[in-house]
């Protein structure tokens, strides 16, 4: 059995309009949401074996906050340029190449791709938009990640910061 957590980056700052999209940091709410959601997730999931993230500043910072909540070393953080504005096909490709020794992985990325990918995984919940710092989690009855795409998936939960306000 494997578990996949899809996490959209937390709310980013638009204070400096001259910054390229890739370099936008988290805003104050984003920092708070990443801290709170990572602690909430820590109560639901005991461990995460790897944290795959877009290297864009807002996604990277979000992933680092979640990794810290799980006391994960930097060796469990993997930054992949392909996760920056990834299409669903990239998620499938990345997952299918994941080391089978990893049971639970988290992927941090951006809309619209992360929402489109999440919607392809479950018929129980569909969404027009995974909100910032939203978490969409599924379990997959597989031993090998290469079997992910065709395997049945079960929704574990779908949560986001505004559900806790």
Image (tube, helix red, strand yellow):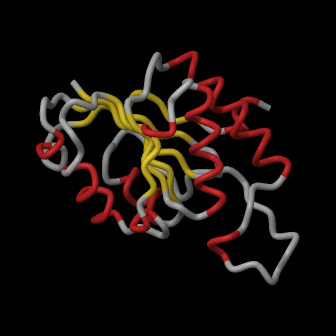
Number of labels in the image equals 0
Residue 67 in percent (x, y) is at: 55, 34
Considering depth in this image, is 106 or 159 the residue closer to the camera?
106
Residue located 47% across and 43% down the image: 77
Which quarter of the rendered picture does the C terminus lie within?
A: top right
Residue 50 vertical position relative to residue 22 in the rendered view, above or below: above
As drawn, is 3 to the left or to the right of 56? left
Residue 74 in percent (x, y) is at: 51, 39
Q: Quadrant of residue 93?
A: bottom left
Considering depth in this image, is 3 or 64 the residue closer to the camera?
64
Residue located 37% across and 36% down the image: 105
Residue 112 vertical position relative to residue 140 in the rendered view, above or below: below
Residue 80 in percent (x, y) is at: 41, 60
Residue 110 in percent (x, y) is at: 53, 61
Residue 85 vertical position relative to residue 152 in the rendered view, above or below: below
Residue located 43% across and 37% down the image: 76
Residue located 44% across and 64% down the image: 113
As drawn, is 14 to the left or to the right of 79? right
Q: Quadrant of residue 104?
A: top left
Which residue is at the far bottom? 18
Which quarter of the rendered picture does the N terminus lie within?
A: top left
């Amino acid at each position: 059995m494997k578990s996949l957590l899809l996490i959209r980056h937390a709310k980013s700052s638009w204070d400096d309009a001259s910054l390229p999209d890739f370099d936008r940091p988290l805003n104050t709410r984003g920092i708070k949401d990443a801290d709170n959601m990572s602690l909430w997730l820590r109560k639901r999931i005991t461990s995460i074996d790897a944290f795959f993230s877009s290297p864009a500043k807002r996604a990277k910072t979000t992933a680092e906050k979640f990794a810290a909540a799980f006391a994960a070393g930097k060796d469990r953080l993997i930054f992949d340029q392909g996760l920056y504005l990834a299409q669903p096909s990239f998620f499938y490709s990345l997952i299918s190449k994941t080391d089978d020794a990893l049971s639970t992985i988290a992927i941090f990325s951006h809309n619209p791709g992360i929402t489109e990918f999440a919607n392809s995984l479950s018929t129980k919940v569909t969404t027009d938009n995974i909100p910032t710092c939203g978490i969409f989690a599924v379990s997959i009855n597989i031993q090998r990640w290469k079997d992910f795409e065709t395997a049945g998936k079960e929704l574990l939960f779908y949560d986001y910061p505004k559900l806790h306000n």
